[in-house]
Image: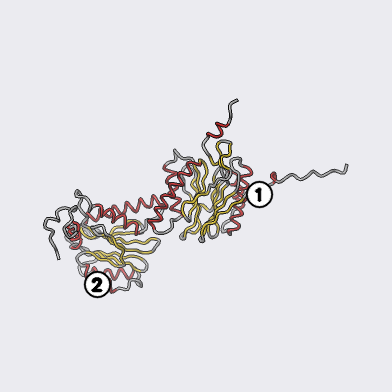
Amino acid sequence: MEPMACQWTDAPHSMGTTIMAVEYNGGVILGADSRTTTGVYVANRASDKITELTDNVYLCRSGSAADSQVVSDYVRYFLNQHTILLGRLATVKTASTLVKELSYQNKSFLETGLIVAGWDKYEGGSVYGIPLGGTLLRLPFATGGSGSSYLYGFLDQAWKSNMTQEEAEALVVKSISLAIARDGASGGVVRTVTINEEGVQRKFYAGDKLPLFHEEIAPRPTPIHAN
Amino acid sequence: MTSIGTGYDLSVTTFSPDGRVFQVEYASKAVDNSGTVVGIKCKDGVVLGVEKLISSKMLLEGSNRRIHAVDRHAGMAMAGLASDGRQIVTKARSEASSYRSFYGEEVPIGELCERVAHYVHLCTLYWWLRPFGSSAILGGYDRDGPQLYMIEPSGVAYRYFGAAVGKGRQAAKTEIEKLNLSEMTCRQGVIAIAKMTRPLSWR
């Protein structure tokens, strides 16, 4: 019997993933799960899929881990120089445009879905979705990754404009938890990043802090019948 | 006023013993002897004006403009050799456009000025190029408000609240200094500029 380990450990790292970003009244909240897989093996159960591009703009990564890391590295490099040249913080639009350019111009080589979100003094909080082909679309909220399939209907009903920070945060955590419950390629913990005028705040929700849904609740003991 | 280089002025790659590059200075002369170009930064924008030089009665009115749009938020007025000026404007347009494509937003005026100045300076470094015989007065409005810059043939560029080049620059500068630019709107600025470039003719 040959060991099955080879196939599992040699496959490229993929982030099945659920990622999302939501604009609220005053800023944005980015959220992601933490599962990185190689095939069906969980290579990292606590990965950080929300990376910094610049002080006020962060990126949610999905798809190929390597591709998304390389894109993020390039954009961070460009934005760093841009910030120095400009003498002020880059806008979320500029960061998104750079990500889009890389995604679109190299579409045949890359397999990564990205969400850019942040805060700047001109537009306030903004969210930009950059799916596989390199489209750039500004949205009030965006989702991505394999787990996002399970969120479309939920968000259609649950999302509303002009939420407070607490409402938006609760929505993000609930959404990621729902996706984790149904998507095998998403799991682990929920990480969120809140960006507003005051700055950036990272939060971490371990498994026990996440809401449970029907089938996940421990079974109640069956009632003992009289006879 | 003029000093002759005597031997050190034959090439743009030659310094004189007192540290001057004469060819670049001579290029500035081309600007000094041309029609006046004026620019002022007002409260709500920038106003550029040029003195119209009628070299022939057969020239079509409205043609041979010396003020060009560079992008939707920036424009340039050229003094000196007209064809050199055209080249600079083309470069500025190209830079503004590529910035927009790459970064997704309009080029900050200071950045645009840097890029144009860099290009103008480049042409003073090689023996097989000659310096541009034009000065550009660049005016624009970006996120930081209205700004005015001037790029000289040497490649030097400064930011101004009032600038003038050409034959009537001394008189124009005196007039600009009298104005209260921080309180002036563009509408009022246009009238002020018209008066400055009026003596000969105005556009």
Q: Residues within 10 Å of mark 1 (few under 14, many from 20)?
A: few
Circle 1 SS class: helix
Q: Residue placed at 37% from the left, 67% from the top? A: B44
Is label 2 or label 1 in front? 1
Which chain does the numbered disc 1 sit on?
Answer: A
Q: CA distance from mark 2 to mark 1?
A: 76 Å
Q: Position of residue A53 (x, y in %)?
A: 47, 51
Q: Mark 1 sits on what residue? A: A208
Quadrant where the N terminus of chain B lies? bottom left
Circle 2 SS class: helix
Which quarter of the picture shows residue B121? bottom left
Q: Position of residue B37 (x, y in %)?
A: 24, 64
Q: Position of residue A87 (x, y in %)?
A: 39, 59
| Residues at marks 2 and 1 on the same chain | no
Q: Which amino acid is tagged 2?
A: Thr
The figure's colour scheme reads secondary structure
Visible residue check, residue A112? yes
Visible residue check, residue A148? no
* Left or right, A171 with reference to A126: right
Q: Residues within 10 Å of mark 2 (few under 14, many from 20)?
A: few
Q: Which amino acid is tagged 1?
A: Asp
* Left or right, B8 with reference to A198: left
* Left or right, A17 with reference to B127: right
* Left or right, A121 with reference to B10: right
Q: Position of residue B42 (x, y in %)?
A: 34, 68
Q: Mark 2 sits on what residue? A: B174
Determine the residue located farthest toward the front in the rendered image: B17
Quadrant where the C terminus of chain B lies? bottom left
Report the label total: 2
